[in-house]
Amino acid sequence: MKNWIYITLFALFLSVAACTEDDITLDSEVSALPYELSQGEEGSLEELIYTFHERYGSYVIYDVDEIELNWTWEDRLYYEMVPVDAEAYRNCMVELISFLMDDVFAVYPDEFIADLLPRRVYLVDTLMENDELFSTAYLVNHSLVIGRVGAEMAAFTDSDWEELNVEVTGQLLGNVEVPQEFYDLIVEDGLILGMMGVYETDPEGEYDSYHYALYTHGFLGSGMRDDYYGMFYVPEEIDDLVDYLTFLMSSPATEIENVCGRFEVVKSRARIVVQTFLDEQGLDLIAIQNGNCPDDPLASDYFNE
């Protein structure tokens, strides 16, 4: 279920015994959080939270109230939340934290995740922003909040986990600046109100009409696919970037070379992503691809050609 390599990036933790409301005192420095963690028993929620903190330097907090969540009022929003039923959904939190560590973050160097991940990660059942229900993952007051931790998450399907992966990754990668050229290269011809028809067929018969339309316009994925009307929706900018990261880090060299060889716009956009993350984040995407696909590694100088 969770073999998906996304980019992806970023997480949560803390223990009921070690981190209740009474334990929390907020320092004037956002990065200086005086929590004490218990290592817990092997396989326990406490052990996962402890390991998460040791690896990324962040705390997962699930015993929280609205006062703590609203301790900063800089954006003049008010957040109302329903806390996690820790007794009923303890296993759900274990599964969530394991998913973040083993699937969402595992493809990246720990230092990269640690740089982007807020020091506090809240797990809640429901979060409302000024009476409006928000998406599953959201950045609030220097913290990452992950909602739907409860009955909803216990019934997650594969697509729900993939959606959560994208949302968490998107929230964290939103801090990474990619040159505007990456977006300017998109082929706008045929895009109407954020939609594109997929009626044109691949003259070489290699790809279906959906993927042929995506690649022709410089996309690797779409916001939504509507097979009934033969349309797809252009992805949001952050989802577009995540698609490229996933493609570059987890696809065999044969696939990357084939898509980039046939569709120059994809290769040009991929080159920008590779160079940006190497220069700005010190993250070598091709080295990561080599590690993920040892039987079909991409040449280190492929995008220099």
Image (cartoon, rainbow, N blue to C red):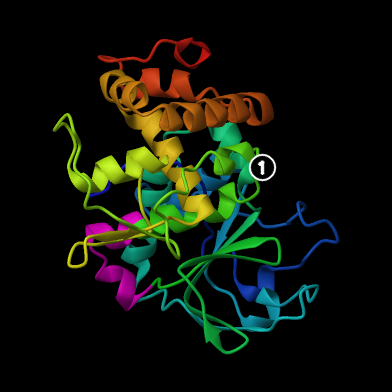
Does 189 sit left or right of 158 as displayed?
right
Residue 223's spot in the image, x, y percent?
38, 58
Which residue reaches farthest left? 205
The crowd level at tag 1 (other Cα within 10 Å; few <14, some 14-19, many 20+) is few
165 above or below 217?
Answer: below
- Which span is picked out in magenta? 150-162
Q: Residue at x 25, y 52 (%)?
A: 198
For the image shown, how many numbered marks are present on the structure?
1
Q: Is residue 299 visible?
A: yes
231 above or below 79?
Answer: above
136 above or below 113?
Answer: below
- Secondary structure category for the residue under label 1: loop
Residue 155 is covered by the magenta coloring = yes
Q: Nearer the viewer, residue 51 or 305?
A: 305
Residue 180 is covered by the magenta coloring = no
Which residue lies under the disc numbered 1? 177
- Residue type pointed to by label 1: Glu
Does 199 sit left or right of 190 as displayed?
left
Which residue reaches farthest bottom? 131
Q: Nearer the viewer, residue 13 or 103?
A: 103
Q: Nearer the viewer, residue 288 or 17?
A: 288
Residue 4's spot in the image, x, y percent?
30, 43
Q: Nearer the viewer, residue 187 or 121?
A: 187
Q: Quadrant of residue 66?
A: bottom right
Q: Is residue 47 visible?
A: no
Q: Residue at x 42, y 53 (%)?
A: 166
293 above or below 179?
Answer: above
Q: Main secondary structure of the magenta part?
A: helix
Q: Residue at x 51, y 62 (%)?
A: 15
Q: Residue at x 46, y 18 (%)?
A: 287
Residue 97's spot in the image, x, y percent?
42, 54
